[in-house]
Amino acid sequence: MPTVEELYRNYGILADATEQVGQHKDAYQVILDGVKGGTKEKRLAAQFIPKFFKHFPELADSAINAQLDLCEDEDVSIRRQAIKELPQFATGENLPRVADILTQLLQTDDSAEFNLVNNALLSIFKMEKLETNLRKLFDKLLEYMPLPPEEAENGENAGNEEPKLQFSYVECLLYSFHQLGRKLPDFLTAKLNAEKLKDFKIRLQYFARGLQVYIRQLRLALQGKTGEALKTEENKIKVVALKITNNINVLIKDLFHIPPSYKSTVTLSWKPVQKVEIGQKRASEDTTSGSPPKKSPAGPKRDARQIYNPPSGKYSSNLSNFNYERSLQGK
């Protein structure tokens, strides 16, 4: 059985491996064997086993069983630590099993343990609800992210026309998925099978390719426009379109990370730009107009709540049609 030093050493191997952690199965097995040690070894195992659980699906049963052994240990501090970490095992098909185990643990006579079990159950129920919502949102997002058209033998598109990309809808859906994904970061890697994830990456790549063409068109169309020229209805639409496409571009780049990242932040295209406090540098002001700074009009106080409304229909319709099909087809 491993010593405390060996447990720390193998923990370090897994922690330092970052994206390649799944390649160190032997190191994780050493940590699993920590449940056979003394009090110190068991306490470490109770913390280390759930931390790397998601990276070793082939050892899922062994890991859960090892943690359950710790939940039944004679040492109350070990039991409490092991119970506290149980929600981390409630992923995918393991969720019902972990929920059933926690339900059985409610029979404890220890009030502190009972509270831990109860909190763990509540945490699992929240995770299950979040996962359900995230899955529905993901399925809806796929509806607006088409697969690339099939190519004929001569290399041309087999279909008659390119699919239209609904940028406004994708900005809303992708942003919502990105926000919820922060709370369940393993969704794309642990909750979906390999084929579904591969399909999503293909859709993202195709959408991103069309997005780059569209961004270049918009920048070219707005280049050199200042002052009153930017206030025409057509150019206002192009400015909003550029915000939308830039936002989508940032979010897609996050999802292309391995594993997917949820760190980037964007200001949604339909949200008002925050006013800068007096005395601060006005770095956030739009410099494309070339106009001198204007005084802020009287309005709601800074902490007043803004109603969260989606973009109006005119932007969605214009964004979908603005020279996109001509650019992809070389017309």
Image: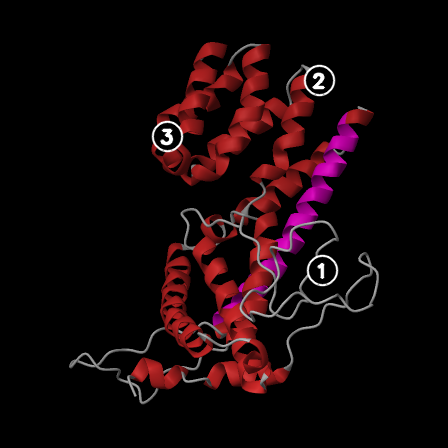
Q: Nearer the viewer, mark 1 or mark 2?
A: 1
Q: Nearer the viewer, mark 1 or mark 3?
A: 1
Q: Which residue is mark 1?
A: 275
Magenta-tinted stretch:
113-142
Q: CA distance from mark 1 to mark 2?
A: 54 Å
Q: Position of residue 174 (x, y in %)?
A: 54, 64
Q: Position of residue 40 (x, y in %)?
A: 58, 11
Q: Position of residue 195 (x, y in %)?
A: 37, 59
Q: Amino acid at mark 1?
A: Lys
Residue 287 occupies which quadrant of the picture?
Answer: bottom right
Instruction: Say whether residue 50 is visible.
Output: yes
Taking depth in this image into account, of 217 and 171 the one nearest to the observer is: 217
Q: Amino acid at mark 3?
A: Lys
Q: CA distance from mark 1 to mark 3?
A: 52 Å
Q: Is residue 123 magenta?
A: yes
Taking depth in this image into account, of 130 and 70 the one nearest to the observer is: 130
The residue lying at 63 percent from left, 67 percent from top is: 292
